Each structure stands twice: as C-alpha cells, then as structure tokens.
Image (cartoon, grey):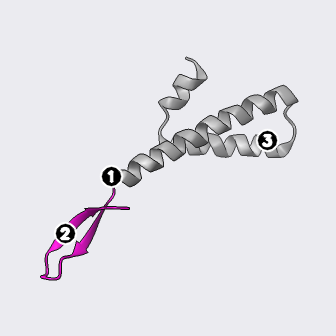
Amino acid sequence: MELKDKIENMTFEAAMARLEEIVRMLESGNAPLDTSLTLFEEGVALVKLCNSKLDTAEQKVKILTDAGDGTLVETDMR
C-alpha cells in the first residue's frame, strides 16, 4: 500500500499518534537526512489530513440555542 493511500485511510487519532511519533524522531536528530526528509513529508501529509478531518467535523457540529420560548433551536456552527 502506498503511503498516500495509507494516510488517507487513517483515523484522526491514528494520524495524530503517528505525527507525534514523527516529531519525536525528528527532534531526536538521530535520523539520517534522507530519512528526516521522508518523515517530514509524511508529517506534512498527516497535518493536511488532520486539518481536513477537523474541518469536516466542524461542519457537522450543531449549536443548540434557546429560542426564547423555552425551546431549543439547532443551528450550524460558524
């Protein structure tokens, strides 16, 4: 399976966990340059995926507000 396909099928939680792992590896400074570049590219792809998933989730979130007469009105989050 290609990295792009693997990333696209990840859950938000799995992507965040992998991103944290990549950050730790890059911060350690122990990886060779080529490996660091590959990890960085993977990290960028994971950040894009996480942002996309967050944007999608935000669009689905509804806000319940009081209509003034004791009833609740559901509106889109903006």
Q: Residues within 10 Å of mark 2 (few under 14, many from 20)?
A: few
Earlier in the chain: of badge 1 and badge 3, it is 3
The residue at 58%/45% (across/down) is 16
SS at badge 1: helix
Q: Label 1 is placed on what type of residue?
A: Lys
Return the residue at label 3: 26
Q: Which numbered disc flags the more N-terminal residue, 1 or 2?
A: 1
Image quadrant where residue 63 sits = bottom left
> Which secondary structure, mark 3?
helix
Q: Are marks 3 and 2 in contact (CB under 8 Å)?
A: no
Q: Residue furthest front?
A: 78
Q: Residue 70 colored magenta?
A: yes
Q: Position of residue 41 (x, y in %)?
A: 70, 32
Q: Which residue type carries mark 2?
A: Val
**Of callouts 3 and 2, which one flags the residue occurring earlier in the amino acid sequence?**
3
Image quarter hosting the C terminus: bottom left
Number of marks in picture = 3
Estimate the x, y position of residue 30 in percent, counting from the top left: 87, 37
Magenta residues span: 60-78
State yes or no: residue 19 in magenta.
no
CA gap between label 3 and label 2 equals 48 Å
Q: Secondary structure at mark 2?
A: strand
Q: Residue furthest top?
A: 1
For label 2, the residue is 73
The residue wearing badge 1 is: 60
Q: Amino acid at mark 3?
A: Leu
Is 56 placed left or right of 24 in the picture?
Answer: left
Residue shown at 80% from the left, 28% from the top? 35
